[in-house]
Amino acid sequence: MESIQVHDKTFVPYLTADQISERVAELAKQISEEYKEKRPLLLAVLNGSFMFAADLFRLLTIDAEISFIKIASYQGMRSSGKVVTAIGMEQDLSGRDILLIEDIVDTGKTLHHFIPTLLQQHPASVQVATFLHKPDATLFPVSLTYVGFRIPNRFVVGYGLDYDGLGRNHRQVYQLAPGVSEES
Ligand code: IMP
């Protein structure tokens, strides 16, 4: 595998397509076992998770539903700060076993703010499956049940993940080249 250029930055190969598909298959097997007879509702968080969600979903061997949502956050009227809403979440979630599908958990901010919004709808359970996790970047604690790969705190693209809109279409994951600054 060769390096790639995305906008102004160079990225080097990090996870191969084979490593990814092997790991996604393991996660699908584990989820199929643990959600047997629960008919989970997977909520895939757009945009980044679409590739992981599709690959994972097609390998599930149980009855399962999937829906795609977009998380939007805005400053609320109260001093309590951020209000987080999801676009595309029309289904009734009460009593459902929800599995949130993420591309990457970085600081944890998105999910840390979104999960309480989900819980207001009284689902039976909420768990998270994320393709990537950067444990060293954590600022907001989030409990992650299924993690594809734990990676260092360095920017990555590919397999759905982008740098300023580009790089999502690669089947592999690439990491910012050594010595290249994360500042744009
Ligand atoms: P968090 O709220 O800080 O956990 O950030 C999660 C979101 O930040 C992800 O869904 C991505 O859209 C984006 N993100 C964080 N790190 C990366 C990365 O290395 N590559 C691409 N997107 C990233």
Image (cartoon, rainbow, N blue to C red):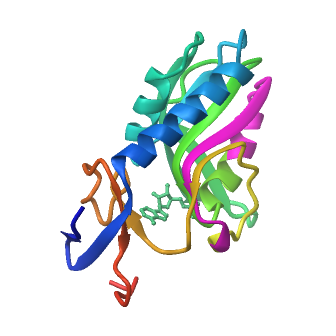
Where residue 46 sits, quadrant-wise, is: top left
Quadrant for the C terminus in the image: bottom left
Please name the residue shown 20% across and 72% down the image.
Answer: 7
Please name the residue shown 40% across and 66% down the image.
Answer: 156
Quadrant for the N terminus in the image: bottom left
Residue 66 percent coordinates (x, y): 51, 22
Instruction: Please state which of residues 163 and 52 is positioned toward the viewer in this rendering.
Output: 52
Q: Which residues are magenta?
A: 115-136
Residue 170 percent coordinates (x, y): 26, 51
135 is within the stretch colored magenta: yes
Please name the residue shown 72% across and 9% down the image.
Answer: 37
Is residue 90 among what the camera can see?
Answer: yes
Instruction: Please state which of residues 23 and 107 is positioned toward the viewer in this rendering.
Output: 23
Instruction: Please state which of residues 138 and 145 is positioned toward the viewer in this rendering.
Output: 145
Q: How many marks?
A: 0
Residue 99 percent coordinates (x, y): 64, 31
Classify residue 44 as left or right of residue 165: right
Instruction: Please state which of residues 103 and 46 is positioned toward the viewer in this rendering.
Output: 103
Classify residue 179 as left or right of residue 137: left
Where residue 20 sits, quadrant-wise, is: top left
Classify residue 132 as left or right of residue 49: right
Residue 74 percent coordinates (x, y): 55, 57
Is residue 76 among what the camera can see?
Answer: no
Please name the residue shown 40% across and 82% down the image.
Answer: 182
Above or below, 20 against 7 in this view is: above
151 is within the stretch colored magenta: no
Above or below, 43 against 175 in this view is: above
